[in-house]
Image (cartoon, helix red, strand yellow):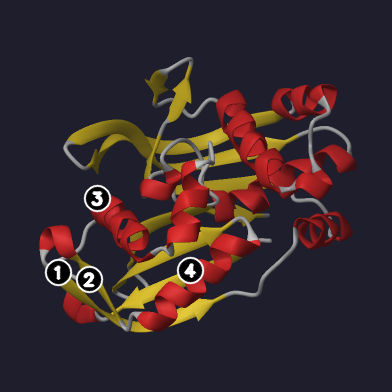
Amino acid sequence: MLRKREIVFSQSENKRLNINNGSLFHGFLMENLSSQMADYLHTQGLRPFSQYLRFSREENRWIWTIGTLDEGIDREMERILSENSMINLKNKDMLLEIDHIRSYPTLSYKDLTRKVYSESGSRDVTITFHTPCSFKISGNNVNLPEIGFIYNNLLNKWNSFAKEVSIDDKDAIDHIIQNTYVSDFNIKGNSYSLESTRKKGFTGKIKLKLKGPDPLVSLCNLVFSFAEYSGIGSSTALGMGGISVEFK
């Protein structure tokens, strides 16, 4: 099950927050998890949620976005947010005022698949990386927006949680990588604070052009629709790889 929530902070908090606070918000969630969910997360190779902090110029407010990838963690996030009218970041001694929360409808993986395949596929996709993105490749941190890295990262997350609609056809995966091209980009190197360390990544926009037959384009659209819930790259539960996608 997929769901997205946006926690919008009051304007009075604008001067106190920055995108590097994402790891602190992860700490807030971990402190408020039930013992059963904490034990469950310790057994998972991938976290069933993503979260990141961004500043919206349109709203002139900081927004904390949480995407959940399974039903159990979604219920847990619902409970935590209902029990905390303010967000307490203990490590920074910050008590943050929530203005309101936007909660989007839940979708099953089958629902998302049906929705995407019922629409005309978009061949132009723009990905905005709000927080630094990087990839863990053979144990090394790689901060290049390589098409293969993006797809393989997203499909690994999809197949870990979408048990009933897996995407594991190697030929199809190879075809979507070969038929996706970067048509334009405006990215820059950036770093992200993770507790006592800093991790290199990139932020900005990448425009993709999708080639090939319509079913292949729909598959690409499905993967990037999922990305808004999962984030892209490594450490997405800690606030990295927070993205939004525009289809044209």
The image quadrant where one finds the N terminus is: bottom right
Identify the element where label 3 is drawn.
Answer: helix
Residue assigned mark 4: 77
Tell me residue 108's x, y (percent). 75, 62
Q: In this view, does 82 lie to the left or right of 184?
A: left
- Between tags 3 and 1, which lies in front? 1
Mark closer to the chain start, 2 or 3 = 3
Q: Which amino acid does label 2 sit on?
A: Asn
Q: Do the residues labelled 3 and 4 touch (CB within 8 Å)?
A: no
**Label ID, residue 242:** none
Nearer to us in this view, 199 or 31: 31
Mark 4 Cα shell of 10 Å, populated few (<14), some (14-19), many (≥20) = many
Distance between the Cα atoms at labels 3 and 1? Answer: 14 Å
Cα gap from disc 2 to disc 1, whole angstroms = 6 Å
Q: Nearer the viewer, residue 167 or 212?
A: 167
Amino acid at the residue labelled 3: Asn
Tags 2 and 1 touching, CB below 8 Å: yes
Residue 223 lies, in percent from the top left, at: 69, 44
Q: Nearer the viewer, mark 2 or mark 3?
A: 2
Q: In what element is the residue under mark 4?
A: helix
Determine crowd level at label 1: few under 14, some 14-19, many 20+ residues with C-alpha closer than 10 A: some
Dot 1: element:
strand
Identify the residue at horizontal 23%, vertical 41% (top origin): 193
Q: Nearer the viewer, residue 247 or 12?
A: 12
Return the residue at label 2. Answer: 88
